[in-house]
Amino acid sequence: AATAPGKKITARLKRTLPVRGPQAPTLSELMRWYCLNTNTHGCRRIVVSRGRLRRLLWILLTLSAVGLILWQCAELLMNYYSASVSVTVQFQKLPFPAVTICNINPYKYSAMKEYLSELDKETKKALETFYGFSEGKSKVRRSVDEWNSTGSDFFQQIPLLKVEDFSRTVIDLHSGQKRKIEGSVFHKDSSIVNSGDSNDIIGFQLCDANNSSECALYTFSSGVNAIQEWYKLHYMNIMAQIPLETKEKLSYSADDLLLTCFFDGLSCDKRHFTRFHHPLHGNCYTFNSGQNGTILSTSTGGSEYGLQVVLYIDEADYNPFLVTSTGAKIIVHDQNEYPFIEDIGTEIETAAATSIGMHFTRSRKLSKPYSDCTETGADIPVENLYNKSYSLQICLHSCFQKAMVDSCGCAQYAQPLPAGAEYCNYKKNPNWMYCYYRLHEKFVKEQLGCQQICKDACSFKEWALTTSIAQWPSTVSEDWMLRVLSWDKGQKLNKKLNKTDLANLMVFYKDLNERFISENPANTLVILLSNFGGQLGLWMSCSVVCVIEIVEVFFIDSLSIVMRRQWQRAKKWWNGRKRAGSGKAGSGKAGSGKAPQAGDVERQGHDNPVCIDEDLPTFTTALRLPLPRDSPLPRTPPPNYSTLRLETAFTEQLPDTLELGQH
């Protein structure tokens, strides 16, 4: 059946009408159409300008403008993620911080002797053997045989060694034998030993209990440091096995530590202090801890309106091998912060009045994307073992303790105990010391990943301290003051306190100026968009509508053209394959002598394959057309009047816009 007249007209219109926009056959035609219709003047001038020089100039100007826009917009984006710092100073009544006080000596030596008797005995023997030290006797060095006759498990588990030379030859001071050591050598002092006298080098060796060939030698240029470090290792092993309740009784009570107390001009006592037990410092006491729901404040600056306490140090009951200084340690912190005495504590001298003036500062940083800080620590994959607000130190210590439990099977004594874990000791964990030192070495070298995981807190409070020291008590007031304090201590007049047993501490605000340091976004989203618009208008006379137009043409339409051309190529290849198959079938039919069917479609006029779009049929070309089989007379070709010809907008027509009026 013949094609309907309406479809023929539609096919003719599609073939002859101009094709514009996303229906353009090529990318070059699409770009030409965009330049002629866009509101960005530079692109239009490239097309309409006459002369190569003028067109080249407009191309350079347009590309330069695009480059400047990209550069300026990149600068705006980088500035968008920057923050400005503002400092605000306010004068107001300030909350007083928590003040934690610890005696440098964690436990009374007289109460600890029964637990430390064997360790102290071996330490004294080591001092006598190495340095001829003897209590109440002449300083005579002991022979190795005498040393061996009184040896104990302390030297068998971790022997003290004297380095004979730098060729890894050591003398075991327990057995007296010389031997070569294997493994790594670590110098635990602040600098590597450069002394030519190798007799000054003493240390100890730690070996893997599961593999005796895995050992590490830790050396010290000072025998004092070597013996003290060796003592602390065994001391922690002993303390880890003592119950917490017992250790609290062995340490100092509030009555033992505190003699007098004043705050804001009023008297205070031990009820204003809260006790907590620190593994390395024993019983510590926090003033104004806020546990009862009340936080004290002060409305006046100066030493008369701060905290004033007199501490009883009791130097005579100090452990001579564990601590080598006398006094107390204090730390000023927020009520929700954990007091890291061992890290940032300030030492207080005896026989002196120590004044600590404070300046209070609150800081607030912006979190992502402005900085890599955390608000509450909830996004940090490390369990908080301290039950206090998040801080970087809490995260680092908790991370190391978790790695200690995972690697060594037990927890390090100086840090809180994770759930389900036990503190390390020789009986249950004979390998813990070697494991601890190896793990700590990795931690210092940032190989455990803790420094990469832990982040700074976005909000924190800080008290800047200024310390001054004066002699106390004065020479003229020493006698009566010590007698009164002795009476207050309950010792009556039969024993006068020694001023080296006392320390006077004053903590106060120097002024009530609160500094608040905060970070604010340097740019808001509105400012960013306004800056973008200004850059686009300045360099390209472009608006948001132009940006949308660019996205539509350069991305959506261009992609559509590319995909359509790929589809047409695939379709052409498939149709050619089908025609090749049908051609073989037709030649087979012709060879068999079969006549064509009556239903075969005949191509007539300009629809004949002899004619193409670029060469419309004329009378001459019509004479070369093959004649229809049922009519020997040639047909007249269609007219080729110039007035009836419709020019297309593009030189090439897409195949899918051509529909032949066929059956």
Image (spheres, helix red, strand yellow):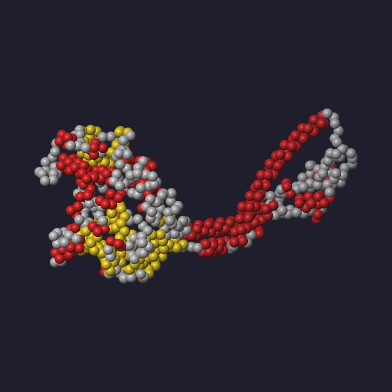
Residue with the most extreme top position: 592
Q: Is residue 253 left or right of residue 141?
A: right
Q: Is residue 106 left or right of residue 138?
A: right
Quadrant of the rendered structure where residue 42 is?
A: bottom right
Q: Quadrant of the C terminus?
A: top right
Residue drawn at x 37%, y 52% is: 386
Say whether residue 506 is visible: no
Name above or below for residue 297 compared with residue 126. below
Closest to the observer: 590 or 59?
A: 590
Name above or below for residue 53 compared with residue 297. above
Closest to the observer: 421 or 662?
A: 421
Name above or below for residue 362 compared with residue 580. below
Residue drawn at x 30%, y 50% is: 245
Residue drawn at x 84%, y 44% is: 604
- So how many labels did they put on this image? 0
Q: Position of residue 563 (x, y in %)?
A: 65, 47
Say whether residue 97 is visible: yes
Q: Position of residue 43 (x, y in %)?
A: 61, 58
Q: Is residue 660 left or right of residue 59?
A: right
Q: Position of residue 457 (x, y in %)?
A: 40, 56
Q: Quadrant of the N terminus?
A: top right
Closest to the observer: 438 or 340?
A: 340
